[in-house]
RNA sequence: GGCCUGAUGGCGGAGUGGUGACGCACCGGACUGCAAAUCCGUGAACCCGGGUUCGAUUCCCGGUCAGGCCUCCA
């Protein structure tokens, strides 16, 4: 089975072939850290995390280098810092920490590298120097601009003929630009704004150059995969590509990124209007109310390139779907215990075959078709369930079936918790002790067939947001919907 | 204004030139003191109008609606 990916540059789905299978490189445009990130900002985080995991599986954990940058020089950051009267690093560190915490809560593995603009300044200035030296860029009125006319392939990635864009543009063109499409590589800082020394005067880099510089410094050209949101195709990635290639001279022989991947947007629908409720669209806030895994599931419920309808029901649906998957894990554990059975170690060959036969891996390798992979997850779960419920339970087969489900789910970053924690994790130790006491009291009432008392205790538990489930070997419980 | 996507059951969402996955929700049954979980089962959809075809949800054209980009933006 081979991975195929849809490449924005060629507008086709192509077999993925890395330049060097020993060192597969991926770069994804990360956040500008001036505030808590919107849930939409986390779609690429989760999507490319899945790709990262898939690549690690295919090429080996140490063979994949994934860089996700952080923009920590920006007007919005400057404004926020000025408003609070603090250095920009106070702002950027605060929100980068929050961003990383949210990403972790959403089950994203940390990228191999997380370069920051402030730490890449020398490479940025050096690259601008190269561009000026070889005639791809020019200085004007304290700015340095990239000369789009010097790069014939400009516009190829986004599929925009330049003249059409200029004709339809609604923005005023700065007078010092030679061509309307030229963009800033370096610009003077305004009063009281952070600035860095450069051969063109003190100032700060334009938006696009940071990524080109980071890619060269952190990964080296060409990179295998360049990812980001669909909105970045133009102008960001188009510009990045142009400078990244042209920095190496006019032959333009340098390959920049072998595959360009872009995720679609979350369609916020009416939700956008609910500002009164507070910023429900912040991942940071959603994580207060829902498990990160459920939010992750919701983000992967649609194909990454398609728009995803983000409505109020989605995360709840995701939570319920995960409940069923986790329930299988709980049941396997309980039934095995009831039978005093030890689950044997799973057979790797059988597990591998199940991932193929269920369609799970084929779906994932087909341009990351996560919705179809989800479907396979349920068929793997059903298989495990029927093995568990078979008349003469074959523990070897149960173990293999459960292992297949777990391996598949884990590859997507799901079922990573102990199932008891999933259902009961929201309870602290004090609450757990109290629940156990109530359940013991209820068990006594049930033994005495005192149904009114048993029901009264159940109601008491329900008031604690706890659901009791009677089973042949005693009652179990779980925390219901978190408010 | 220019360029570009998408429109599938109550909700989310795959897929396909020839009986329309999967999940959530709903309904009926089994199990249960009652529930929950689980199991069995039912119902329910391809925006509109043309065209191509033996046959279109799937291909083509037009329309409507929604969204994106052209300016910071996942």
Image: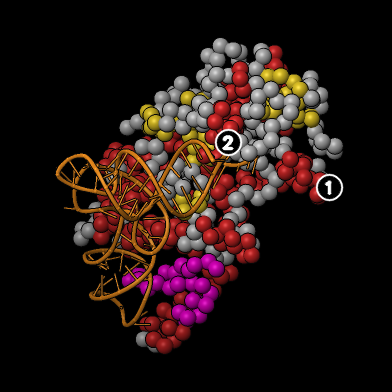
Asked if labels 2 and 1 share a chain, the reply is: yes
Q: Is residue A474 magenta?
A: yes
- Color scheme of the displayed model: secondary structure
Disc 1: which residue:
A85
Residue at 67 percent across and 33 percent down: it is A207
Rendered location of residue B9, percent (x, y): 34, 62
Residue appearing at x 62%, y 45% in the figure: A100
Frontmost residue, A192 versus A483? A192
Q: Quadrant of residue A443?
A: bottom left
Residue A28 x/y as whole percent? 55, 35
| Residue B31 picture location, percent across and down | 26, 75
Please state the extent of the stretch shown in magenta in the rendering.
A457-483
Crowding at label 2, few (<14), some or many (≥20) Cα neighbours within 10 Å?
A: few
Camera-nearest residue between A414 and A150: A150
Q: Nearer the viewer, residue A363 or A312?
A: A312
For label 2, the residue is A168
């Amino acid at each position: 089975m081979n991975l195929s990916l849809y490449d924005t540059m060629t507008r086709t789905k192509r077999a993925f072939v890395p330049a060097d299978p020993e060192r597969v490189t991926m770069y994804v445009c990360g956040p500008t850290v001036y505030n808590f990130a919107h849930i939409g900002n986390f779609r690429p985080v989760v999507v490319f995390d899945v790709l990262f995991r898939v690549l690690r599986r295919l090429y080996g954990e140490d063979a994949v280098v994934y860089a996700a940058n952080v923009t920590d020089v920006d007007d919005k950051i400057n404004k926020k810092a000025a408003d609070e009267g603090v250095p920009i690093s106070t702002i950027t560190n605060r929100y980068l920490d929050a961003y990383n915490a949210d990403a972790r809560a959403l089950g994203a593995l940390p990228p191999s590298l997380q370069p920051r603009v402030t730490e890449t300044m020398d490479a940025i200035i050096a690259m601008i120097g190269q561009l000026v030296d070889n005639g791809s860029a020019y200085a004007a009125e304290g700015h340095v601009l990239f000369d789009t006319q010097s790069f014939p392939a400009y516009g190829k990635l986004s599929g925009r003929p330049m003249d059409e864009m200029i004709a339809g543009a609604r923005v005023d063109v700065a007078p010092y630009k030679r061509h309307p499409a030229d963009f800033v590589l370096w610009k003077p800082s305004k009063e009281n704004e952070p600035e860095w020394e450069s051969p063109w005067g003190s100032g700060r880099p334009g938006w696009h150059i940071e990524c080109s510089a980071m890619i060269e410094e952190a990964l080296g050209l060409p990179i295998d995969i360049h990812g980001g949101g669909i909105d970045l195709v133009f102008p960001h990635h188009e510009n990045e590509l142009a400078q990244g290639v042209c920095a190496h001279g006019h032959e333009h022989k340098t390959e920049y990124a072998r595959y360009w991947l872009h995720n679609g947007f979350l369609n916020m629908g009416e939700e956008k209007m609910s500002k009164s409720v507070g910023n429900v669209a912040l991942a940071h806030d959603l994580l207060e109310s829902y498990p990160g895994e459920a939010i992750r599931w919701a983000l992967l419920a649609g194909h990454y390139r398609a728009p995803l309808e983000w409505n109020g029901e989605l995360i709840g649906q995701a939570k319920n779907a995960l409940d069923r998957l986790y329930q299988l894990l709980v049941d396997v554990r309980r039934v095995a215990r009831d039978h005093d059975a030890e689950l044997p170690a799973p057979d790797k060959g059988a597990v591998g075959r199940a991932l193929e036969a269920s369609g799970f891996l084929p779906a994932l390798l087909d341009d990351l078709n996560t919705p179809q992979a989800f479907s396979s997850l349920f068929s793997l779960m059903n298989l495990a369930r029927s093995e568990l419920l078979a008349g003469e339970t074959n523990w070897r087969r149960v173990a293999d079936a459960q292992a297949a489900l777990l391996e598949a789910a884990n590859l997507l970053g799901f079922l990573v918790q102990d199932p008891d924690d999933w259902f009961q994790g929201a309870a602290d130790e004090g609450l757990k002790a109290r629940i156990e006491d109530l359940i013991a009291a209820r068990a006594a009432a049930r033994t005495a067939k005192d149904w009114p008392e048993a029901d009264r205790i159940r109601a008491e538990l329900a008031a604690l947001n706890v659901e009791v489930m009677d089973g042949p070997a005693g009652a179990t419980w779980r925390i219901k919907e978190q408010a």
